[in-house]
Amino acid sequence: MKNILTTAVLVAASASGALAEANLINGNWYGKPVDKIVYTGWGQSGTYNKVTDMTNGQCKFEKVNYDGNLAPLNGEVSWHFRGPMHLKQFASYTPGSTTKRSLRQSQHQRKHGHAHGHQERAVGDIVTATINGDVVTWVNTFGGPPTDSPAAATPAAEAAKVASQAPKPSPTSAPKVNAGAGNWGRQAYYNAVEGTADGLVFLNNMGGQGSGVFDNNFGNSLSYAASDAGSGSSSPQVLGDILLGDNVEFSIYTDKPCEGNSCGYYRPGSVAHHGFGGDSKLFLLEFSAPSSNLKTGFNADMPAAWMLNAAIARTQQYGKCSCWDSGCGEWDIFEVLDAGNTRMKSTLHIGPNSGGESDYFERPLNKEETLKAAVIFDNANKSGHIVKLPSDTKFDATISDQFIADLGSNLAPELTKVFKLAS
């Protein structure tokens, strides 16, 4: 199978004239390191299947329409992180707003006992399935037997999928961010060194451990995460100033619980919070991803940071009872695709308009030298931006529109890559 895939991809790459610009390594295309990736042509309409019920082991759906400049991720999103990674800061902002004063400020860390066993997630053999389900972008040659994985594709189908991702030429000039007029206010903030978290909560898929639920049909629901992220908790805790271990994951939602129908349907008994909403939104994060040097084991030495439609994890993040398969939205921001790789790629999954760039961000391997980055949903320009920031960037309570509009504008052309989504 490996030889078939490689041959198909090399032929496709040669036909596109892109072979000289990228290399196929362990089943994934890699171009050059960049400091900014912009996704343009986002505004399109479509449908996905929304979960409406999870009763007696049965999952029910209904088809819903979406439309908008950044649909379907113009609604609420959640953030997700996987080790080995050390998250140092995280902040969310919305335009034309003041700083949010959280009802739960400076939550103090608590120590918790050992982690209990939990159900492994269901993933597939496609590259970003290591993030959330059977994805359609790159073939994952890294092993590890997944649980409840989807049926394997035929060699010809896999070859076609890989070949379709052969690097394609893209515009050299990136659009500036339309930041609107006025300051952007910080709505949530986490600082690992200070041990504070305002306006957000840390969750993980450890339902049944202090909070949330577990059953044999849908596995673990969301729960509050303990400060080490390795187990559940009965109440919100602040993530410690820690290096996450391999394949340890946690999620970030806002500190506003779902009440009534405010979040739509979510799994009964689960810990359910609102995601980060708004057509235009900005996130700042600071992290390092030092290598664990593990070469075997599920998701060994494969750190990642990504966003999901917030409804996905509130039903079943790793399984079929969510809107993920039908394209309700995932944006992989920084993702290592095979054990120990020093390249972090990005991919956008929004139904049939999914796509990913072969160029990549360099992994921040030195735990003393973190990577700071901005992720911007630019509603006016129907685009999304990922920008590496100067090391002295502050995560202030307010950020000027000019600062946002200028993000990455001083980068050399070769450090910026524009990826135009299919129309």
Image: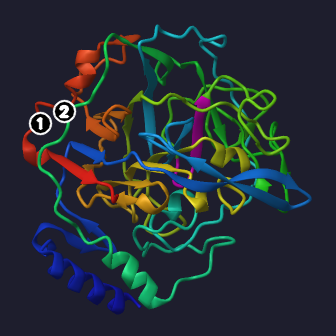
- At horizontal 64% and vertical 48% (from top left) the residue drawn is 312
Find out whether residue 66 is within the magenta segment.
Answer: no
- At horizontal 34% and vertical 31% (from top left) the residue drawn is 380
Q: Is residue 157 above or below residue 408?
A: below
Identified by mark 1, the residue type is: Leu
Residue with the most extreme right position: 56
Residue 310 marker: none
Front in this rendered view, residue 391 or 19? 19
Identified by mark 2, the residue type is: Gly
Q: Is residue 179 above or below residue 28?
A: above
- How many discs mark residues in the rendered view? 2
Task: Say left or right for 2 vs 388.
Answer: right
Residue 408 marker: 2
Q: Which residues are magenta?
A: 245-253
Indicate the quadrant where residue 13 lies. Answer: bottom left
Q: Are marks 2 and 1 in contact (CB under 8 Å)?
A: yes
Q: Position of residue 150 (x, y in %)?
A: 62, 75
Q: Position of residue 288 (x, y in %)?
A: 36, 40
Residue 17 makes an appearance in the image: yes
Residue at image mark 1: 411
